[in-house]
Image: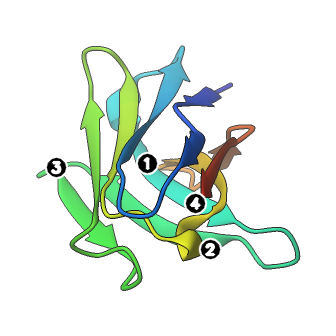
Amino acid sequence: QVQLEESGGGLVQPGESLRLSCRVSPVPFSRYSMSWYRQDPGKEREWVATITLPGPATSYADSVKDRFTISRDGTKRMLYLQMNSLQAEDTAVYYCKATDRFTQRQFWGQGTQVTVSL
C-alpha cells in the first residue's frame, strides 16, 4: 500500500514562490509515475504536472507551464513541486498522486492548502 503525505502549503502573496513536498512510502519509488493535482472548492480536480521514469520525463498543464517545476528524489522517496510567480488562480488544495506503472493503480495523498492572496 502506497502512502503519500504532502506538506509545504501555506498563504503567500501574488508573485511569491512556494515549494510543495510529497513523501512516498514505503514502496519502490521507481515503480510509480508521480503527479500533482489541485482542486478549488466547487471545481473539479485539475491535473497540474507529471514526472515519469526513465528520463525523467515531465509534463505540465498550460496554466502552470514555465512557472511550476516538478521533480523527484528517488533516494529520499520525495516528490516536489516548485511553484514560482504564484497567482490568485493557483489557490487550491494540492494533491500528490502515485500511479503504478504496471497495474495503473492510483494512490492519493490528503492534500495541502495553497492560498495566494494579498
Say whether disc 1 or disc 2 marks the residue closer to the N-terminus.
1
How far separated are the C-alphas under marks 3 and 1?
12 Å
Label 3 or label 4, whichever lies nearer to me, is 4
84 vs 3, nearest the viewer = 84
Q: Name the amino acid, label 3.
A: Pro
Residue 46's label in the rendered image is 2
Residue 34's label in the rendered image is 1
Q: How far across and how far down the image is residue 110, in percent?
A: 75, 38
The quarter of the picture where residue 18 lies is top left
Say whether disc 2 or disc 4 marks the residue closer to the N-terminus.
2
Is the residue 77 above or below the residue 94 in the image?
above
On the rendered image, what quadrant is the N terminus found in? Answer: top right
Label 3 or label 1, whichever lies nearer to me, is 1
How far separated are the C-alphas under marks 1 and 4?
31 Å
Residue 5's label in the rendered image is none
Residue pointed to by mark 4: 118
54 vs 59, nearest the viewer = 59
How far separated are the C-alphas under marks 3 and 2?
25 Å
Q: How far across and how far down the image is residue 61, in percent?
A: 40, 79
Residue at x 16%, y 50% (from the top left corner): 56
Say whether disc 3 or disc 1 marks the residue closer to the N-terminus.
1
What element does badge 1 sit on?
A: strand
Say whether disc 1 or disc 4 marks the residue closer to the N-terminus.
1
Residue pointed to by mark 3: 54
Label 1 or label 2, whichever lies nearer to me, is 2
Q: Name the amino acid, label 2.
A: Glu
What element does badge 3 sit on?
A: loop
